[in-house]
Image: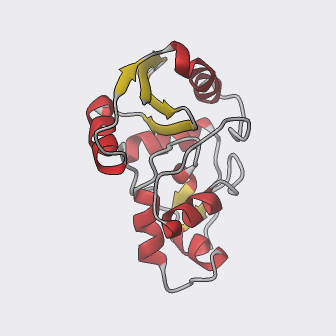
Amino acid sequence: MVYWTTFQFREWQVTLAATEGGLCYVGLAEDSEQRLNEWCNKQLGEIPREKNASKLAVYANEVAKYLAGVQTDFSNLSIVEQGTPFQTEVWRALSEIPYGETVSYSVIANRLGKPSAVRAVASAIGKNPLLLVVPCHRVVGKDGSVSGYRDGVDRKARLLRLENSSIVVG
């Protein structure tokens, strides 16, 4: 069973989904409910889904705190990573980027010991289903440019401003 909900927090439209194992999807776009359905069909198959805000309350509260500007790393949340072994390796590396900091795609590739895999790293980052919780918004171009975010570059830029991120490239 996948439980899901949507809620509005300030200017953010948030879509969350979780299984009994933990949070599995976070979206920030107006069409995230449709994107969630597409993601579920691809990653989980024809699993039953139920809209249930109470099952997701703990996750919604943490996301709302983050969007209110409270520094959090979401480490207290149970999450379920649905991806290939390489994707989950990349996503775990993203979780090590501190709040308010950014790194380039090449830095992530180097941290994984795969300096020539920058494009593969970027592709894995683009498939991250757990926006905010796995902070892919903290990854920028080598020149510091803000690009490539599943729910739009404008949202990525807003998240970086929320964190008062300084662009650090390497």
Residue at screen point 55% across, 45% down: 80
Find residue 49 and report its image quarter.
top left
Residue at screen point 65% across, 38% down: 78
Q: Position of residue 84 (x, y in %)?
A: 46, 64
Q: Is residue 126 visible?
A: yes
Q: Is residue 34 above or below residue 129?
A: above
User: Which of 17 and 130 lies nearest the eye of the viewer?
Assistant: 17
Image side of residue 90 versus residue 97, left or right: left
Q: Is residue 14 visible?
A: no
Q: Residue furthest top?
A: 54
Image side of residue 159 versus residue 68, left or right: left
Q: Position of residue 24 (x, y in %)?
A: 50, 40
User: Which of 81 and 153 lies nearest the eye of the viewer?
Assistant: 81
Q: Position of residue 85 (x, y in %)?
A: 52, 67
Q: Residue furthest bottom?
A: 116
Q: Position of residue 120 (x, y in %)?
A: 43, 74
Q: According to the image, what is the colour scheme of the structure?
A: secondary structure
Residue at screen point 46% across, 39% down: 25
Residue at screen point 50% across, 44% down: 130
Image quadrant occupied by the C terminus:
bottom right
Q: Is residue 123 above or below residue 66?
A: below
Image quadrant occupied by the N terminus:
top left
Find residue 65 and report its image quarter.
top right
Q: Is residue 69 above or below residue 10?
A: below
